[in-house]
Image (cartoon, helix red, strand yellow):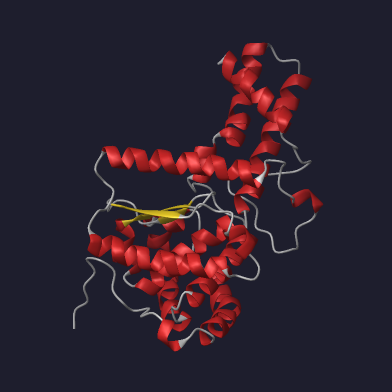
Amino acid sequence: MTGFFFLSLAACDTMNIPAGGTAGSLKDTSASPTSDDKPSDVSPSKLASLGNQQYNKEIEERQKNNEIETSTKVTGQMDGIFEQLKAAALIDEEYGSVAKEMDWRLNTIRDKTIVMAKAYPGGGVAIYDGVFDVAETEGALASILGHEMAHVLAQHELKRLAGHTAVAGATLGSAIALAMKPKKREQQVAAGVTGALALGYLLGGRQAWERSQEHDADCLGLRLAAKAGYDPKKIEGFWRRMAENKEEANTKYQFLNDHPIDDERLGHIQNTCMSKAQEVYSQVDINLRKDALATLPGVGFEG
């Protein structure tokens, strides 16, 4: 434990710890960010490096278990969706320059117990085939994955990390001020420091995003899907279905665990995001538009 404690001290010393911050589920904010909301001095390149490490670890573990999808029928469809979203990100007026800094790559993972698509800082993307039966269509999956990519493009993880770092620093300062004995101080500080440094937890997406970040990612994700050629009007029904079954969906589907759907979020998608996405879609060459209702692998409809 002693070694961990000194590592924690060094980490806190190298980060610009802001004056405020919260741990656990992040705050619901609707106001514009202030100077106190700015990210820590963990650079985007450092975060990308950490994200790449986490992604590579996940893929290596899945490879050992022979869980990386190799069927060309499946990977071909997933690659098609991903490549369209990547192309949309690269030409996005707001985030194109960020997208060009990413090392974008995709792996599809065979694991029906995980209902999620995940984009990591740095550009690694994982689609778990448990999401197929829930998303059902290419358009819905493009919206889910676009949302995940949006968090990466907007570098929301930097702000999320800053909040944990602040808690770690405050906990450490309190422990020192109380003149705790080293062993007790280590136990007291460990929880706060772990929150700041356990990037596998943060990057793995097991913590709720701020409401404002969710709103941004919903709009940007839908915009990317539209620019990729998927009609937003044919995607909207998916989010409505999730909201109608929100109690089950938010608990059962991993992609909603840290992005819970409710009537407020659905209303934002419908009333704020949809019009801009539809405008973007209207500008896509008709020959480049995709079938948003094309079914995903293994999904069948009756009637």
> What is the x, y in percent for residue 163?
67, 43
Percent from the top left, x then y, of residue 190?
59, 25
How many callouts does the rendering have?
Answer: 0
Q: Position of residue 175 (x, y in %)?
A: 72, 22
Does residue 221 appear anywhere in the picture? no
Against 187, residue 270 (above or below) is: below
Residue 49 occupies which quadrant of the picture? Answer: top right
Residue at far left of view:
303
Q: Is residue 174 left or right of residue 6?
A: right
| 291 or 273: nearer the viewer | 291
Q: Is residue 37 left or right of residue 279?
A: right
Instruction: Return the x and y of residue 171 as percentages of the image width and height.
Output: 69, 29
For residue 183, say whether it is visible.
yes
Q: Residue at x 74, y 26 (%)?
A: 174
What's the residue at 79%, 55% (across, down)? 34
Displayed quadrant of residue 252: bottom left
Quarter of the image with the C terminus is: bottom left
**In the image, residue 252 above or below residue 162:** below
In this view of the protein, which residue sits in the foreground, 125 or 91?
Answer: 91
Q: Quadrant of residue 90?
A: bottom right
- In-image side of 26 versus 117 (left or right): right
Q: Quadrant of the N terminus?
A: top right
The residue under the point 24% across, 53% down is 70
Residue 276 horizontal side relative to residue 176, left or right: left
